[in-house]
Amino acid sequence: MSNQFITFLVVFLCVLKLSLQCLPPFGWTPPTIEERTRKAPLVVRARLIKKIPSGGLSFKRQFGPHGSYTACLKVSHVYKGVLPAGDVCASGFGEPVFCKTDLAFGVSYVVFLNTDPLSARYEFIASAAVPYSNTIFSQVSKGVCCSKEYIRCARALVCPTAWSATASCKCR
């Protein structure tokens, strides 16, 4: 075999391994936004304001090992949990090729976080944040509000625009 063929084969297998490592098992379905909201101790709406490489500048001189970084966020709404006022930084974000959630500047996200330490919460591959929309907000609302209360209200549920651990929703 020629050296070129062996080099090509090694590069091809490495790329193949990276591209397949984030595939879920066959037949598996990801949890819904509502389920992810119920499981996460902290759910916020925020925009990325800064990326801090984790562990130095070893990955493309931009991200830390395995493409990871700490995301500093400007929080506009706290949907679930308690968060000190001001900007916050949470670890565990990164390159999708490493099965992490990569946030973009200028986009409003619903972000699912762990609280001790403050870090991205993954229920499955690259699932720590989703771009904000009214549909996503509706699903987060269902996850924050008690499911029984949501069903009892027959979709006529009024939830506050920001929640704390003790907030409750009201039927219209």
Image (cartoon, helix red, strand yellow):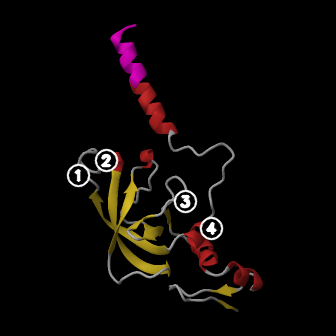
Q: Amino acid at mark 3?
A: Glu
Dot placed on the residue nearer the N-terminal end, 2 or 4: 4
The chief SS type of the magenta part is: helix
> Is residue 91 in the magenta section?
no
Q: Earlier in the sequence, mark 3 or mark 2?
A: 2
- Decide which of tag 1 and tag 4 comes sooner along the chain: 4
Magenta-tinted stretch: 1-10
Local secondary structure at mark 2: helix
Q: Using the image, determine if residue 136 lies above or below residue 171.
A: above
Residue, disc 3: 123
Under mark 2, the amino acid is Pro
Residue 101 sits in which quadrant? bottom left
Q: Which residue is mark 4?
A: 35
Pointer 1 residue: 56
Q: Which numbered disc, 1 or 3, marks the residue that appears first in the sequence?
A: 1
Which secondary structure lies at badge 1? loop
Contact check, label 1 and label 3, Cβ < 8 Å:
no
Helix, strand or loop under label 3: loop
The answer to whether the residue labelled 2 contacts the one labelled 1, judged by CB atoms less than 8 Å apart, is: yes
Q: Residue 164: x and y, percent?
A: 50, 86
Query: Label 4 amino acid?
Result: Glu
Judged from this view, the residue extending furthest toward the top is 1
Residue that badge 2 annotates:
65
Which residue is pictured at 26% across the width and 53% down the height? 55
Image quadrant occupied by the N terminus: top left
Closer to the camera in the image, 95 or 124 = 124
